Amino acid sequence: MSFSLLGLDQRLVSGITALGYREPTPIQKEAIPVILAGQDVMAGAQTGTGKTAAFALPILQSLMARVDRERDPSERHVAGLVLVPTRELAQQVHQSFEQYAVDCPVRVAIAYGGVSLNPQIRKMKAGADIVIATPGRLLDLLYKGALDLSSLNYLVFDEADRMLDMGFIDEIKRILKHVPKQRQTLLFSATFDDAIFSLSKTLLRSPKLIEVDARNTAAIDVEQMVVEVDEDRKRELVSHLIGSKNWHQVLIFTRTKQGADILASEMCKDGVNTLAIHGDKSQGARERGLEEFVSGKVRALVATDVAARGLDIENLNYVINYELPHIPEDYIHRIGRTGRAGNTGLAISLLSAEERWMLEEIEVILDTKLPTQWLPGYEPDLTKEVVVSRKNSRAAQKKRAKQRAQGKRTGNRRR
Ligand code: AMP
């Protein structure tokens, strides 16, 4: 099936053909006609499935008709808002819109925190047809009167599960006060749980539920390997694997920012050129790091979950979970960085005895058992005492979330 058969404008079809898209991915096949028909959508789609084009193309299509009609940009209001959890994803979605709309005079603006506000205010005031934004920065702009969303036609939540995980629910509620009730709403989420369903009830009207993969399953093109190893030998093993197998462009996940910095500097000492990116690095440093990784100047990139969100790197073959994530759904997001758009990938998780419960939580959401193995020379020392802290287990997190909801504690929010 071709994109033209989905009813897309020839200008959009030529934009995506230039990007090498030959035919629509399953999510695009299902979602594009429904969105073009004006229905709300709730879609379960992981990164790597082509979900961005699934919402961007039909929105652009309808905007093009308006742009053709109303040639004077000053007469046009903001018609589309895409909310995303992180600046990296904002940039990626922005880039996709610009690439798809290369032959269409649609104005796409972007807003995210961590950089100065004024240039974004100026850009918004100059006028935009579509705004892509993280929730916190969007509110800043709304409060400054830099943009008016009162005539919005499309509201998109991209990676909605992640937005909730990051504690953006209050920001979302505040943003909803600025948008009209009469609109088309599209919600994309890699995973569905009760929180997503209850959010969807407040946002969507008779949505079409679209799921292209079985719920909560990992990308099928990724080979998953779990290696049992002692915590204090993990770094040595990572450097050994990368060096001995001559791997390039390896994305490594740690749980903490400090852990990312330490690992990157130790790996450099091992002779593997490595950089760390995380939320404490400036936007410029993160972008430069990513560029060096993509261009092959650095061989390995160590990232935290938040920083890695939205990274779209072509042909990434290797992901290493240096530490397993506390949030089991993050495992799916992490390994979804590889095996994208038809490429195969390898995801290796290094499992210390203390992390076994995290593996169990991941196996529950994947509904599959991930067999573990030892690597010669790195076998775990079974005589060591194991101290397990479950303070970040799903059960403990739920308890804390409940307490927060009851006003007993306040959580830290990240922008
Ligand atoms: P996404 O899930 O939107 O992050 O997209 C993942 C990757 O797939 C991106 O590199 C897109 O450029 C690419 N992609 C999206 N749709 C298609 C398509 N129909 N054919 C080939 N590649 C695609």
Image: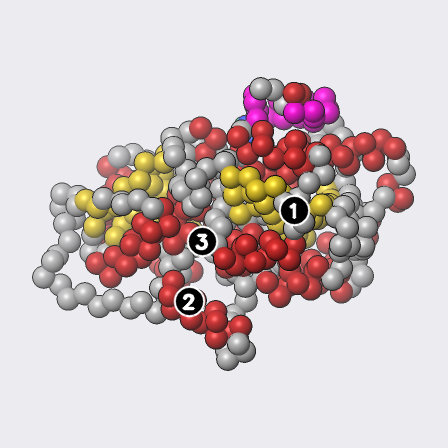
Magenta-drawn segment: 6-24
Q: Residue furthest left?
A: 383
Q: CA distance from mark 2 to mark 3?
A: 17 Å
List the residue tagged with mark 1. Answer: 206
Image x and y of residue 144, in percent: 78, 64
Q: Is mark 3 within 8 Å of ligand 1?
A: no
The residue beneath circle 3 is 305
Q: Within 10 Å of the Cα at label 3, are there few (<14), some (14-19), or many (20+) other Cα atoms?
A: many
| Spot occupied by residue 14 in the image (x, y as percentages of width and height) | 67, 22
**Of the two numbered discs 2 and 3 in the rendering, the one whose residue sits closer to the viewer:** 2
> Relative to 411, does residue 206 appear above or below in the rendering?
above
Q: Is residue 246 shown left or right of residue 118?
A: left
For marks 3 and 1, give the one nearer the viewer: 1
Name above or below for residue 101 compared with residue 311: above
Residue 142 appearing in the image:
yes
C-alpha span from label 3 to label 1: 33 Å
Nearer the camera: disc 2 or disc 1 = 1
**Which element carries disc 1, helix, strand or loop?**
loop
The amino acid on which the numbered mark 3 sits, given as a three-letter code, is: Asp
